[in-house]
Amino acid sequence: MFTYAARRRRWRRRRRLAVLAAVAIAVTVAAQHAAHPQQPDGTPVSRSASAAPSTTSTGRVRFGPGFRWFDFYGINLPVSAAAGPRRIHNGLSGGFTDTPLGAVLAAVNIAVRTSAQWGPRIYRPTINHHVVGPAAGILLAADNRKYAALRAAAHVAPGQPAGRGYAVEAAYRLVRYTPGSATVAVVSEGPSGNGTAVLAVTRIRVRWQRGDWRVVAPPGGTWSSSATTVASLSGYTSFPSEG
């Protein structure tokens, strides 16, 4: 069974193999913003009639059969045969169902792919086609600058990923859901600046547009405005093992 504990051990092994600390630190949306602590969001789940069959008052969703983990440059991302992403090609993904589960999966899969770490072949089309909101252009410009610095540090060819990922997508909470929009809090575990493990929760808004979920760009085009550190997974639901 591919449990959180197993994925955490795998991350620890990979972290020990890291050569560039800068690459290992900033690999996921949450981990790269862990230095901006705030109070954890305690907003209750808002449930609509259409959401009731597949959500609970604790902000959980029912994953059901056909759930698995997809290796994305060292980070395991959640995938459901029923809820998406239905399209995974050349590092990109899309095609989620307009359901609570689809919203959770879209939040994780799209937001992680907006990181400059993976190079312009991934973050540019992801932001251009799967990110909406007034700050989308700011996010893209920031990624262009970050990628230039990461590529120089990692000494990789232009356009290539600046290293693999060293983080675990650990848990989530569906903060709010309607058929047209949702807010998902995603907890990631990754290395901090001093090499210790840190849990960081990123609040991700998604919006149903043009037949799919789109991530709303974070305020100011930086995920640090939507991230906070947490001491434990209390109040969040761990992602399931494969089934």
Image (tube, rainbow, N blue to C red):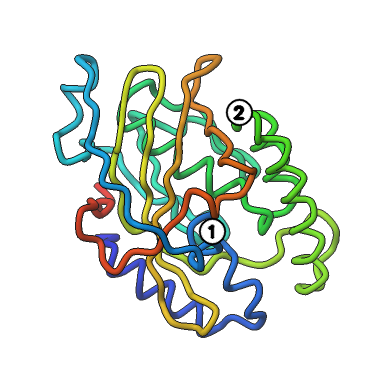
At 37% across and 66% down in the image, what residue appears? 199
In this image, 62 relative to 139: left or right? left
How far apart marks 2 and 1 lie (CA) works out to 19 Å
Between residues 183 and 168, which one lies in front from this camera angle? 183
- Residue 175, given in percent of the width and then of the height, sits at 30, 38
Name the residue tied to disc 2.
132
Name the residue tied to disc 1.
28
Q: Which of the two marks, 2 or 1, is nearer to us in this view? A: 2
Q: Amino acid at mark 2?
A: Val
Helix, strand or loop under label 2:
strand
In this image, 166 relative to 186: left or right? right
Between residues 222 and 81, which one lies in front from this camera angle? 222
Q: Please tell me how crowded label 1 is: few (under 14), some (14-19), or many (20+) other residues with Cα within 10 Å.
A: many
Between residues 44 and 147, which one lies in front from this camera angle? 44
* Quadrant in the picture for residue 127: top right
Image mark for residue 98: none
At 17% across and 22% down in the image, what residue appears? 52
Q: Amino acid at mark 1?
A: Thr
- Residue 126, given in percent of the width and then of the height, sits at 64, 37
* Quadrant in the picture for residue 161: bottom right
